[in-house]
């Protein structure tokens, strides 16, 4: 595995030692986890969290949702970083993919088919789910906890761990720069939150980085919403 992924971390986020706090959350969670994993869209925060996790568990499974609608740049970057860091990448796909479903039905139906269903099915095999969610990303994530139970549709409860919940986008970028982590080239084109190509634009509201997702129609795709 590349030393870029396993080498000692240099300076990163400021404030009340956010980086040390995140590493503490990571180490504590991994110490008790039997089957941990991380989900990654290969956006900046996902890559930063993966870099941190590899310091402790280099063979951690990295789950990527292959929705059949990603930007070519996202897939190329995924493959490059996987090779560079020696990631244990697991590509998840819908059992019955339907390209363009968002046009024929709705973005909700498309997200459910290509994101929610394959991820929740895969998470049945894990007890600890690391995610790079942050509280400042949207109102729907404002009350995010670093550790909390998460109930899957089957009724199984797993642990969702968000070590960088308290970080800001500035903290993420500072960490990436300090550790020489290359980021998805789409950021250079003005994108601030990157998902599937048909449902991602540059931000509609300069003050809301996620406003370029789903044309502002919704805040979440559904994978971070518990089954009722």
Image (cartoon, rainbow, N blue to C red):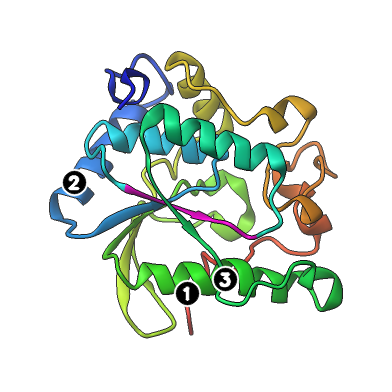
Circle 2 residues within 10 Å: few <14, some 14–19, many ≥20: few
Do residues under tags 3 and 1 come within 8 Å of each other at their CB atoms? Answer: no
| Disc 3 versus disc 2: nearer the observer | 3
Name the image quarter holding residue 205.
top right
Front residue of 12/72: it is 72
Image height of 18 relative to 14, above or below: below
Query: Which residue is label 1 attached to?
Result: 226
**Residue 107 percent coordinates (x, y):** 76, 69
Q: Which residue does the image show at 82% across and 45% down from the upper left?
A: 201
Secondary structure of residue under mark 1: loop
**Image-based side of 82 in relation to 17, left or right:** right
**Residue 60 percent coordinates (x, y):** 29, 46
Give the total number of marks visible in the rendering. 3
**Residue 195 percent coordinates (x, y):** 67, 50
Q: Which mark is residue 28?
A: 2
Query: Which residue is label 3 attached to?
Result: 94
Q: Which residues are magenta?
A: 61-67
Secondary structure of residue under mark 3: loop
Per the model, the C-alpha gap separating discs 3 and 2 is 33 Å
Name the image quarter holding residue 16.
top left
**Image-based side of 1 in relation to 226, left or right:** left
């Amino acid at each position: 595995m590349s030393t870029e992924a396993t080498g000692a971390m240099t300076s990163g986020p400021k404030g009340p030692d956010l980086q040390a706090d995140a590493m503490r959350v990571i180490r504590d969670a991994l110490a008790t986890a039997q089957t941990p994993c991380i989900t990654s869209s290969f956006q900046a925060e996902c890559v930063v969290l993966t870099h941190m996790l590899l310091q402790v568990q280099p063979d951690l499974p990295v789950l990527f949702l292959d929705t059949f609608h990603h930007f070519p740049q996202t897939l190329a970057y995924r493959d490059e970083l996987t090779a560079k860091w020696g990631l244990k990448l697991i590509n998840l796909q819908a059992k019955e993919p339907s390209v363009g479903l968002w046009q024929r039905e709705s973005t909700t139906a498309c997200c459910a088919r290509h994101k929610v269903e394959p991820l929740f099915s895969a998470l049945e095999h894990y007890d600890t789910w690391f995610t790079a969610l942050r509280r400042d990303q949207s109102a729907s994530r404002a009350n995010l906890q670093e550790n909390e139970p998460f109930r899957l549709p089957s009724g199984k409860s797993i642990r969702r761990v968000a070590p960088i919940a308290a970080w800001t986008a500035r903290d993420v970028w500072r960490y990436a720069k300090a550790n020489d982590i290359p980021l998805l080239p789409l950021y250079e084109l003005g994108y601030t939150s990157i998902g599937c190509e048909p449902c991602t634009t540059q931000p509609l509201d300069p003050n809301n980085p996620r406003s370029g997702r789903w044309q502002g129609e919704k805040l979440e795709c559904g994978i971070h919403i518990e089954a009722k």
